[in-house]
Image (cartoon, rainbow, N blue to C red):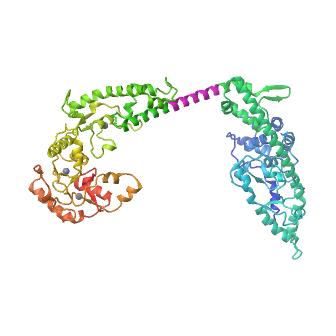
Amino acid sequence: MPSGSTVTNHDSLPKVPNLPLTKKRRTSVRELHGLPESKSAPGQCLFPTLPLELLAEILIQTNSPRDVLSVARASKLLCSTLVCNPAADFIWRTIRKRCLPHALPEPTPNFSEAAYAAFVYDGGSCDVCKKDTKEFYASFATRIRLCRDSRCKKNIKRYLMDVTTIFKGHARDEIWIPYVESTHCFDLNIDKAWPENPTILMRKSEWERFRADYAAFSALSPPPSEGLRKACTDQIAKFPKVMELAVALQKWKCTYVTMHHTIKTKNETWAKALATQEGWNEHDLLNSQSYGSLHRHKNHVLEEVTLRVLPSVVLSDFLSIKPLVETQLLKMQTHRQNKENEASYRQRRDDVEQYYNRLRSAGTVVPSLYEFRKLSVMTTMQGSVTGSRPNSSGLAKDMKNSALVAELVAADLKTWMASAREKLSELLGFPKWRNASKTKLHPLDRITARFRCQGCGKVAKRYEKERCLDFAGVCAHECPSDDKKDKRPMDWSVDRFVKDEKASNAVARLLTLVGITDEDANAYNTVKMLGAHIRCLSCEHAFIVMDFPTLIGHSHRHDNMQAAILPKGEGPERAFAAGLSAKLMDMGSKPQKLRSEANYRCRHCVPAGESADASMDGEGRVSTGEPIAKDSHTEDSQTGNQKRRQRNKKSKLRSMDFNALRSHLKGLHGIEMVSDEDFFARP
Ligand SMILES: [Zn+2]
Ligand SMILES: [Zn+2]
Ligand SMILES: [Zn+2]
Ligand SMILES: [Zn+2]
């Protein structure tokens, strides 16, 4: 096939059926088949059924082939009336001669009028980035289209081939397939058009095809076939016409672009003046639905927004939509104001949160953030979305630096806490506690002061190990909402808390072992210093040791936990690793790897008398300060248990990955929450 196909391509029809129809209404079958019209139903659009003369009268007023294209694409009926109908050609022709900025050049004979309009006005995909664009062809002869992206303008060179030197200056006489018609196509600064333009730029793909045809056509032996000779001579004959049209279109496009620019500037100036005159926001005006679309449409059809000149009628398009524009502008203003208010409110809330976090990290006992916002000074600071403090600038600074704010907050916190302290002290058995001593701790500040929430039974992350709350924890406690939609926490109430007897008693018993009381200000440091030397005697079956915070959590496993303190230097062979379980429970990629290693063993499966490696007599070294509390098991069940343990000993002593360990602890020992004392990791 000779490369002539590129020229015959010019006969392409407008892409009517491929485009989405802009109007959904179906043309009735009756109309298509030329049946007599029935009485039209109300609301039915009569436009497509207009006689051609009237349709022409209307369309010619538009002065825009682009508009006629849109109408033709609105329905099958309109398409057949306007496109597939030689009688309608006069419409296209008339408009083509009257369109802006000036008449389009005559098409070459291969174009129908409709196809020509589509060729000039339709957009298409960019030859570089392949994205759709409404831009005209960059080169009409080669049908290269570029979007507005400057990178595409730069990169088009990769698709082009400069063959000027290959033909040693004779290219213009010897090449007969369309090449880039003007230097202006890709460089607005140079304007040399065919035939003067000395540079011959071709699409690379077309060059390849042309080269083959050219060689065959100009060869003396074998002489070119009849088919090739005819195809080539046809193209050679058409070539100047194609190039002439391309050059003329290029010039037309240039005028169009200039006029578009002028009109756009004029319309913008007018809009600006209008906005100033009416006291409107210019940006809003251009973005308002009614005026904005009018403005853009006018730019598109190269008309000024101000006036439309009909024969003898001067009418402002704008005046008719002015009330609508005003309503829309007002709406936009309100919308913007609301958004500003919301942003400012959010900012103030953030400022309060920051202030809260500062207080908290300084060690102040504070309620949860949710409750903190309810303090009267914070309510005033935050204001509301539409409320009295719309201006947020400087609030953060005020809060940070103002001594007054600090004082007010302290006073509010004190009031908030007074009743809580009263009530909680009562729970601990010290109603109306007053004491002059400076060394005796307030009951709420003692390490035996442990509470739990009856409402949810949950604790915040930092109390996970202890699984109960101290006074600060009670204040900051938040019961999560049951409502899945409303994520707001439930309102705090001191009535929801009770004394955690198990934990409190276990701590008290430990203090007895150490020989101090909970009133001692040093009590906490003393028990902390014990390290992992506390053994649970209630876990008779195994050698379970732990540190003080773990003891508080562990105490919940027994009704009446008994403990012993191991002498310094003694303990299980595999040391207690504080924080190991928390680290493994952490959802991260590193813990994930650690979890999957088969590296963990259950301490509960190592009988009390043996160490993990069956080489240590743990029992012998325990210093029992208190008598061991006996389990309520009968002899029978104990021997049964022992037998089972023996049987399972081998399998249970194996190393497991962390998840297997968790299900082992749950299944065999009834331990739901794995804790540091339950297992050890091989080093
Ligand atoms: Zn592009
Ligand atoms: Zn709760
Ligand atoms: Zn225990
Ligand atoms: Zn076990």
- Answer left or right for 222 relative to 14: right
Q: Considering the image in quadrants, where does the N terminus appear?
A: bottom right
- Answer left or right for 21 relative to 570: right
Give residue 509's quadrant in the image.
top left
Question: Closest to the observer: 439 or 622?
Answer: 439
Q: Position of residue 263 (x, y in %)?
A: 79, 36
Question: Closest to the observer: 65 or 465?
Answer: 465
The answer to whether one can see residue 39 in this image is no
- Which residue appears at 34% of the width and 62% of the height? 597
Q: Does 143 lie within the magenta span?
A: no
- Which residue appears at 28% of the width and 29% of the height? 420
Q: Does 338 lie within the magenta span?
A: yes
Question: Closest to the observer: 493 or 482?
Answer: 493
- Residue furthest to the front: 438
- Which residue appears at 39% of the width and 52% of the height? 587
Extent of the magenta region = 327-344
Q: Is residue 375 positioned above or below 119 on the image?
A: above
Give residue 82's quadrant in the image.
top right
Q: Is residue 371 positioned above or below 142 on the image?
A: above
